[in-house]
Every structure is written in structure tokens, then in C-alpha cells.
Amino acid sequence: MTLLALYDHTAHAQARQAAMQPLPELLTSDAELIASKLQQRGIGFARWPARAQLSAAASQDEILAAYASEIERVQQDGGYATVDAIRLSPDHPDRAALRQKFLAEHTHSADEVRFFVEGRGLFCLHIGAEVLQLICEQDDWISVPAGTRHWFDMGPAPQFCALRFFNNSEGWVADFTGDRIADAYPLLEQLQLNA
């Protein structure tokens, strides 16, 4: 289930200092409300059907071929010259290191655009005095503008496949902020339990 949790960061920090369980101001799985709240903050979000059935052994080329029409549409709309597919499973040998890397707040000089064709992951967006946590699942497309502070949690046993669109030739390049804000918010498995 796609889920959005919206927090006022100041109220969240005050609740934590008072040893209270910080609660989100909004917690919803309504796709239209999610799209509206994200759009108000400059984040693109849509639901598309992930129509292809991929085998567990599907190569990156097979994944990209299966979603060629969606890839073409996104590339035409946003000028994204480079596309790849990232697929992680619970037995991935680098899952713990990758999780820690993506959990650190960072920005990109280019947009971060993803279409989830399998599984789920948690995008966390730090926009002004707010933190938005969005569990993206199969069929979810998200576009995070360049310069937006964010982090991503794939969980302790990652299970997802996402198309990644880049408007640069280098692919995923992060500028880490050094802010430990991610430590104050629920991880993927915790947010799912509280939903």
C-alpha cells in the first residue's frame, strides 16, 4: 500500500525531546490526496500500471525492454537521456551497506525520477520545516526535483525493482548534507507497522 506520512519537523523534534511518540500530521493511503500534497510541494507523483511480469532472473536489458513505452514517455516529457533499472533482493550481498548509504540525507544536481515496477521503498523528503515520508510500491512513479533534500530506505530485506531516469550521463551522484535528520524518523518497516 502506497502511504504518505507528513510531519512538521519542529513539532516532531519537540515530541522526541519530551520522550513522546511523534505522530505525523497526516497519514494517508489515498492516491489522489498523496498526489495533491506532493504536487503542492513540487514533487511529481503518479500511479501507472506495472504491466510486465518479470522473472526473478530478468536482466537489466529485459526489464528496460518490458517497459520501453513508459521509458519513452518519461524521456520525452523530461529530457532524461539515461535510464537504468535497479533491482535488489533480500539476499543481495551489499544490502546493508547500500541501505546505510541511501539513508544519509543528500541532494542531487539533477532530478531523481523513479518508477517502481516491483516491491517497495521509502522516500523521505526534507522540504523546509516539513518531512514527508512516502512508501512507494509497484505502480508508483515519483519525481524529486534537483536540490531537494531527501533520503531513501529500502528496508533490511530489500525487495524492489525500479526504473531510474537521469538527465545526466553520470547516473546516481549524491551530495550528502551531513545532517542526521534521518535518524529521527521511522524506517520503512516501522512506518509500515504504524500504518
Image (cartoon, grey):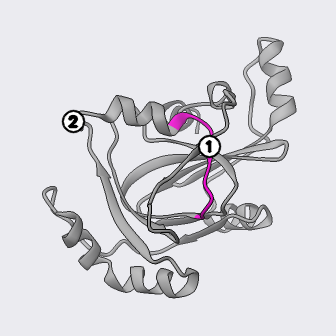
Viewer-side residue, 192 vs 99:
99
Vertical arrangement, residue 24 with respect to residue 26, above or below:
above
Question: With 178 as the anchor, is 166 left or right in this view?
Answer: left
Question: With 27 as the anchor, is 152 left or right in this view?
Answer: left
Helix, strand or loop at label 1? It is strand
Query: Residue 86 placed where, x, y %?
Result: 33, 56
Cα separation between marks 1 and 2 = 26 Å
Residue 181 included in the magenta stretch of the image? no
Q: Which residues are magenta?
A: 103-111
Viewer-side residue, 161 vs 27:
161
Query: Residue 42 placed where, x, y %?
Result: 75, 65
Q: What residue do we see at 39% from left, 70% from top? A: 83
Mark 1 or mark 2: name the one nearer the start of the chain.
2
Residue 105 included in the magenta stretch of the image? yes
Q: Which residue is mark 1?
A: 106
Q: Which residue is mark 2?
A: 91
- Displayed quadrant of residue 18: top right
Quadrant of the snapshot with the C terminus: top right
- Displayed quadrant of residue 84: bottom left
Number of labels in the image equals 2
Vertical arrangement, residue 175 with respect to residue 60, above or below:
above
Vertical arrangement, residue 99 with respect to residue 39, above or below:
above
- Secondary structure mostly seen in magenta is loop
Q: What residue do we see at 71% from left, 61% from top? A: 38
- Looking at the rendered structure, the kind of residue marked 1 is His
- Displayed quadrant of residue 176: top right
Vertical arrangement, residue 85 with respect to residue 52, above or below:
above
Q: What residue do we see at 66% from left, 27% from top? A: 180
Query: Residue 159 placed where, x, y %?
Result: 32, 46
Q: What residue do we see at 80% from left, 29% from top? A: 12
- Looking at the rendered structure, the kind of residue marked 2 is Asp
